[in-house]
Amino acid sequence: MSTLFINARLIDPEAGTDDLGSLLTRHGQIVARTNGDEGVETILAAHGLAAADVQVVDCGGKCLAPGIVDIGVKVCEPGERHKESYKSAGLAAAAGGVTTIVTRPDTTPCIDSPETLEFVTRRAQVDAPVNVLPMAALTKGRDGREMTEIGLLMDAGAVAFTDCDHVVTSTKVFSRALTYARSLGALVMAHPQEPGLSAGAAATSGKFAALRGLPSVSPMAERMGLDRDIALLEMTGAAYHADQITTARALPALERAKVNGLDITAGTSIHHLTLNELDVADYRTFFKVKPPLRSEDDRLAVVEAVRTGLVDVISSMHTPQDEESKRLPFEEAAAGAVALETLLPAALRLYHAELLDLPTLFRAMSLNPAKRLGLASGRLSDGAPADLVLFDPDAPLVLDRFKLQSKSKNTPFDTQRLQGRVLATYVAGEPVYRKDN
Amino acid sequence: MQPPSFDQPHLLGIEPLRPHEITAILDLADDYVTLNRQTEKHSDALAGLTQVNMFFENSTRTQASFELAGKRLGADVMNMAMQASSIKKGETLIDTAMTLNAMHPDLLVVRHPHSGAVDLLAQKVNCAVLNAGDGRHEHPTQALLDALTIRRAKGRLHRLNIAICGDIAHSRVARSNLILLGKMENRIRLIGPPTLVPQQFAEFGAEIYDDMHEGLKDVDVVMMLRLQKERMDGGFIPSEREYFYRYGLDADKLAQAKPDAIVMHPGPMNRGVEIDGTIADDIKRSVIQEQVEMGVAVRMAAMDLLARNLRSARQAEAS
């Protein structure tokens, strides 16, 4: 089956362009695109197709972009299916324009063996309408002592290895795991943080945390963690992705490491790009994330780093928590926020604030994460999978958390005004989501 | 008597209070000091109301003070030692609050080990909530009783040089005092080792000193804070005796302050750690006993004002 998208604002992160044009997909792949308003017949004739064989989608001048590849999504299977299942996460992703979710292994039990990984892959295939690529733990039980069966896990489909927010504190264990991963060409994702300094912290140290009396951590803890990891990369030469860089102080270290030719990339979370520490206000636990929200200066510095490409990837860091985990005093409340559905509208805040243009946003949300994982998706070029999101960047909405597809409703954007709505999402050319009118 | 202008449903902290509301509490507290010094010390301001004291953290002095304040005003007072109770059985704070709310209390006095917990609880109940200390956040009645003590000793509560000394970082008393004394336009100095004094407090307009001799120069009020035992052994300070040597209030350091400077301590004291026993007992300098007395009066005033607002709010609802 072929689909022809006409009259679309094509957001091409590879070329950095944002132009009106048409896009033809066939057998799940992008096969052709044209700029301008060439007639339907001309395009079809050029590809030897009859009008009857082709479904035509008139995008009405709205944006068509490569679907989002979201690294670091938590789906709570196995263990806490009441918080999020593959089905609910898949529906949320489709509604949010996310066509590939790269899942975290910090489940209960964690995904540290080929057997648990196979369970997850099977569940994902049955239930999720989008592509699901699992990551596996780097050390058994995520407790930083013994490395997992990286080779067998790769054969079972693991695309990267991470202990998530658990820092491997032993540099010996971590350096060996990096060395071993390198020999297999495995990507290691880590959480740059000095765990001693950040132990027990619920906020970033500063005026706000001091006033609210919250245990806090200096933003320096992130740079210390990153510095350590960079030193280990120099030793081992492994492929490394920092899950979230959220502070200005960590950026020069990251830049030096890239200039020195290390195989390093970095991500950041949508929450750290669009919210700051003051949003916590009167101990609102939906704003408790890990690492904690930073100062406005840090936020702007990281937005700028996304613009320049120093920070490669924007992730949702989707972390479902049920009401009971959040209806607690701030220090006791669980960290994390759901974000699959709000990732794009929140990111569009940066576009509407004229901080980032759309190709830059999709470079960070689609192209770069796909590249880092060696996927062909994340672009609009011929031969790429037809994983697409059609959205209206200007459509306003007031977010109602109870309308989210996720089983958990812990979003910091509840009742907030957002601009930007997904109209349709396509995975391998097939629609997996269409907004009701 | 003209009803004082105090327009708050709860007393969760000093931060939401406006200066004239602080003055309203202190003025009424002055009346209650007079009442408390009589042999017949009873009023009916809270008659018919139920006051519940929920302490999720150990307290002897504050709880006794709130209990006495409620009883002198004619409230039915119940104490709940939450440490020993349902929290241990896994009940969440909100469930506990909802359960209690169903018993229709009118005044809820809460202490909790986590910052913000009392705010959270206040959102879920329909009675007046008084914060008796939440984590490292606020302890408003302590700041109010300190303010009353200062006002009575110095004749005013503005344009004073006030030093707060010791473990500022972990102290809700210090936070509430810093906010209150700042609102009333005093100059505040924070004195202590840098491990216990967050430098961010400079942004609130406080001056920060790590040398106590220098910091106490010409101050009108010296407020000492308690140093928790678990923070004495090498984590934040090298030892108890080094702390006393550098930051313990003794005659030599106090000599730097104004000759009529008063010495305060929220209690309980560690004699020989943060304060020399002879200074604590010096009735010419120390107002520590007065602080305890003012505590009862201030809590009576706060509960009285909240009860008035509660009654008029419920009346408005009914009509």
Image (cartoon, rainbow, N blue to C red):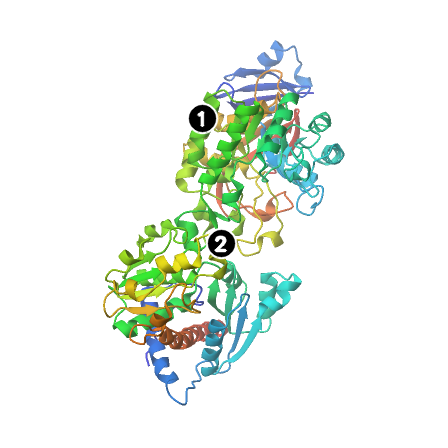
Element assignment for label 2: loop
Q: Between B4 and A157, which is closer to the camera in this rendering?
A: A157
Q: Is residue B219 visible?
A: yes
Q: Amino acid at mark 2?
A: Tyr
Q: Are marks 1 and 2 in contact (CB under 8 Å)?
A: no
Farthest bottom residue in view: B39
Give the numbered dot on residue A46.
none
Q: Which residue is mark 2?
A: A283
Q: Chain of mark 2?
A: A
Crowdedness near tag 1: few (<14), some (14–19) or many (≥20) residues, C-alpha within 10 Å? some
Q: Is residue B16 left or right of residue A109?
A: left
- Which x, y percent locates residue A46? 60, 9
Q: Mark 1, mark 2: which one is toward the viewer?
A: 1
Q: Say whether disc 1 or disc 2 marks the residue closer to the N-terminus.
A: 1
- Which x, y percent locates residue A21? 52, 19
- Which x, y percent locates residue B250? 33, 65
Quadrant position of residue B271:
bottom left
* Relative height, residue B231 to residue B59 (above, below): above
Q: Between A55 and A299, which is closer to the camera in this rendering?
A: A299
Q: Is residue B294 left or right of residue A376?
A: left
Q: Between B244 and A128, which is closer to the camera in this rendering?
A: B244
* Relative height, residue A145 to residue A426 (above, below): below
- Which x, y percent locates residue B14? 39, 63
Give the numbered dot on residue A255.
1
Element assignment for label 1: helix
Q: Same chain for marks 1 and 2?
A: yes
Q: Amino acid at mark 1?
A: Glu
Q: Between A338 and A60, which is closer to the camera in this rendering?
A: A338
